[in-house]
Amino acid sequence: MQLAIPHAPRRVRLAQVPGAVTRLVRGVVLGLTVIAVLGLGAGYLGRYFVEEQRFTARAELVDALVGASHAPPLNQREDAEGTLDVLYTFAGEEHSVSGVRTDAEHAAGLGHGARVQLLVDPSQPGRPREATHARARAARVGLLPWGLGLGSLVALAGFAWEVRRLWRREVVPLRLGALVWLTPDDGYLPEGKGEAVFPAHFFRQDVKHAVRARCRPQRAPVRNGGKVLAAVVPGEPGWCRVIDEELARTLGWVR
């Protein structure tokens, strides 16, 4: 094989690197899947968020008496909920409601006859919420849009990072890296599928440089006796990328 390799910077596109586009498409699909899941979650949580905001806007503050309180055992109260049975008057009508949720510690501290405040929706006067608990819950719900937005940004940032990683890992060594004849320390290249890493070395100006080299064992490398052609990764002189015959032909480096 006769080589005709241009001087750096060489014209190399990501699409010319075998497998790079497949990995990029895989990253796009993964990113779109994450965004789609976030979109579905946003649709569901958005309705929940709007409903919580509407309730908070419509609800009126009402004083009530506790008929009974129910709380989990002491060792199970952390971040748990309790319930209240309450008596209250709204719009001239008396209501007796059981199962009004509140914080477990709060419920445990309320006995028969204690006073609490409820938020009551005029359209559903028989479904009150304990005011402190409802307001704390509404505040947490208010953070949902920010969480969804952050998740979308993380997905986009992950895709951008993958594109940058592919470019630096696959294209930059071929465009700008020094080309060397690499000698595997074990005397042979690894076998198997996918990408493999092996120890190797090369000489430059009579100085031996030890490196870690990446190759794809299923692709025939460009050889010169027991040596293989490789590109030194710019900025990471301890790494090399082995150049196979198919890639050399694709890049037009073969006469």
Image: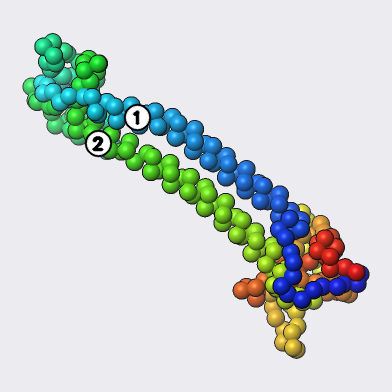
Q: Is residue 49 left or right of residue 4?
A: left
User: How many other residues sit within 10 Å of disc 2, few (<14), some (14-19) or many (≥20)?
Assistant: few
Q: Could you tell whether 11 is left or right of 145 in the image?
A: right
User: Mark number for residue 136?
Assistant: 2
Q: Residues within 10 Å of mark 1 (few under 14, many from 20)?
A: few
Q: Amino acid at mark 1?
A: Val
Q: Please identify the quarter of the rendering in which residue 231 is found.
A: bottom right
Q: Is residue 215 above or below residue 194?
A: below
Residue 229, position as x, y percentages in the image:
80, 72
Q: SS of the residue at dot 1?
A: helix
What x and y, as percent, mark residue 205? 74, 88
Question: What secondary structure is marked by label 2?
Answer: helix
Residue 197's image quarter? Answer: bottom right
Q: Which mark is in front, 1 or 2?
A: 1
Q: Is residue 133 above or below residue 243?
A: above
* Quarter of the rendering occupied by the C terminus: bottom right
Image spot of residue 67 (x, y percent):
13, 18
Left or right: 228 in relation to 43: right
Which residue appears at 12% of the width and 27% of the height?
A: 116
Residue at 82% from the left image edge and 60% from the top image edge: 250
